[in-house]
């Protein structure tokens, strides 16, 4: 059985459309499936739509968060509820093409344990967002040590991979975690489609926070920046120290208050940047140590309706 995990935030108009599009494909290809809709604390009628769908269909599970915990938490909740032999994560707005699920499933049948959806075209996206995404994935690929260019949350995981990820206690970045765990991988390219309804819930500020949070959660490379800056300042200090010593020996005083001011400002800026980076990692450690749950499920629904026996 294939478990279809669908995180949703304010997607009331997309719930039935997503179910209908994916279920019809599964039925055509004789694939048994269950749908796990995770309502990430929506402010509209998303959960009501999920509840109604569970009453009408025989293979729907609905989870409702007590508040908005974020997409990563929604995916974690979905993975923790998987009953199938494999699971696929797909966006509710269907920008991830549902027909690719069948291609992923066939690759899984061939023995691949992780099938990654790789973006071939990003669709109609703001240039700033597109540039930021490329920069982010380039940065995290170098820091983490594996290529995540054009990666997405759209991927299929074997049950054993799901179990491993569920056992990991850290608040990890799903896209990076699925690379890190290893296993036998295959890729499927896709073009990002237009949303079936509504608009993206991601703001520029939200995307920046998301990027910074995920880089810090999966790599300690920014901490090395502090060391690098310290080495730079050591070199500069040695140069100016030798310069001052030579001026002292030859009897010429070091001239220019401007130089002193610039050096002081430069050193102060580096110190503040370094403290900021260290402080952010300490904050991440603090969040992990508190041990609060990644999400709180305030209510859930499960289909009780069964199909009538075939005649």
Image (cartoon, grey):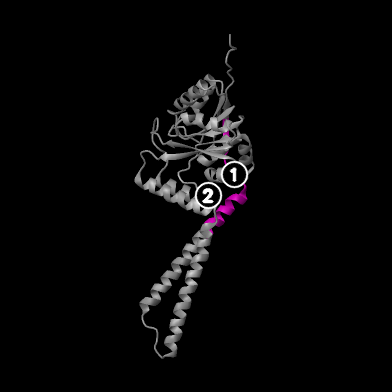
Classify residue 130 by image quadrant: top left
In front of the other: 64 or 73: 73
**Which residue position is annotated with label 2?**
146
Q: Position of residue 50 (x, y in %)?
A: 51, 27
Q: Position of residue 127 (x, y in %)?
A: 35, 46
| Residue 155, magenta (yes or no) | no
The answer to whether 189 appears left or right of 164 in the picture is left
Instruction: Pinpoint residue 294: horizontal percent, then vertical percent.
Output: 58, 42
Is 309 rendered above or below residue 65? above
Which badge, 1 or 2, comes first in the chain's sequence? 2
Residue 21 shows up from this direction: yes
For label 1, the residue is 182
Residue drawn at the location 48% of the way across and 73% of the way down: 235
Q: Picture coordinates of residue 65 (x, y %)?
A: 54, 35
Can you say which quadrant of the picture contains the C terminus? top right
Under circle 2, the secondary element is loop
């Amino acid at each position: 059985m294939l478990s279809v995990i669908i995180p949703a935030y304010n997607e009331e108009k997309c719930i039935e459309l997503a179910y209908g599009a994916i279920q019809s494909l599964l039925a055509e290809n004789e694939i048994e499936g269950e749908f796990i809709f995770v309502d990430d604390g929506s402010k509209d009628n998303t959960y009501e739509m999920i509840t109604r769908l569970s009453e009408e269909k025989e293979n729907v599970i609905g989870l409702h968060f007590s508040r908005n915990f974020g997409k990563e938490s929604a995916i974690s909740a979905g993975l923790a509820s998987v009953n199938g032999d494999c699971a696929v994560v797909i966006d509710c707005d269907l920008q991830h093409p549902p027909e690719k699920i069948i291609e992923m499933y066939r690759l899984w049948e061939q023995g691949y344990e992780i099938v990654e959806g790789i973006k071939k075209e990003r669709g109609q996206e703001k240039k700033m967002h597109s540039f930021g995404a490329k920069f982010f994935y380039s940065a995290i690929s170098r820091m983490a040590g594996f290529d995540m260019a054009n990666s997405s949350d759209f991927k299929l995981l074997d049950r054993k991979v799901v179990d491993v990820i569920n056992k990991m206690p850290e608040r990890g970045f799903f896209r990076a975690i699925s690379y890190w765990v290893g296993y036998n991988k295959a890729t499927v390219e896709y073009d990002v489609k237009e949303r079936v309804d509504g608009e993206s819930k991601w703001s520029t500020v939200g995307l920046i926070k998301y990027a910074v949070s995920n880089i810090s959660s999966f790599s300690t490379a920014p901490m090395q920046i502090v060391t690098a800056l310290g080495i730079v300042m050591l070199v500069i200090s040695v140069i100016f120290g030798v310069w001052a010593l030579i001026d002292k020996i030859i009897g010429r005083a070091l001239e220019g208050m401007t130089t002193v001011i610039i050096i002081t400002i430069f050193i102060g800026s580096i110190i503040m940047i370094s403290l900021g980076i260290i402080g952010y990692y300490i904050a991440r450690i603090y969040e992990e140590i508190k041990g609060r749950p990644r999400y709180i499920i305030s209510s859930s629904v499960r289909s009780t309706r069964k199909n009538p026996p075939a005649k």
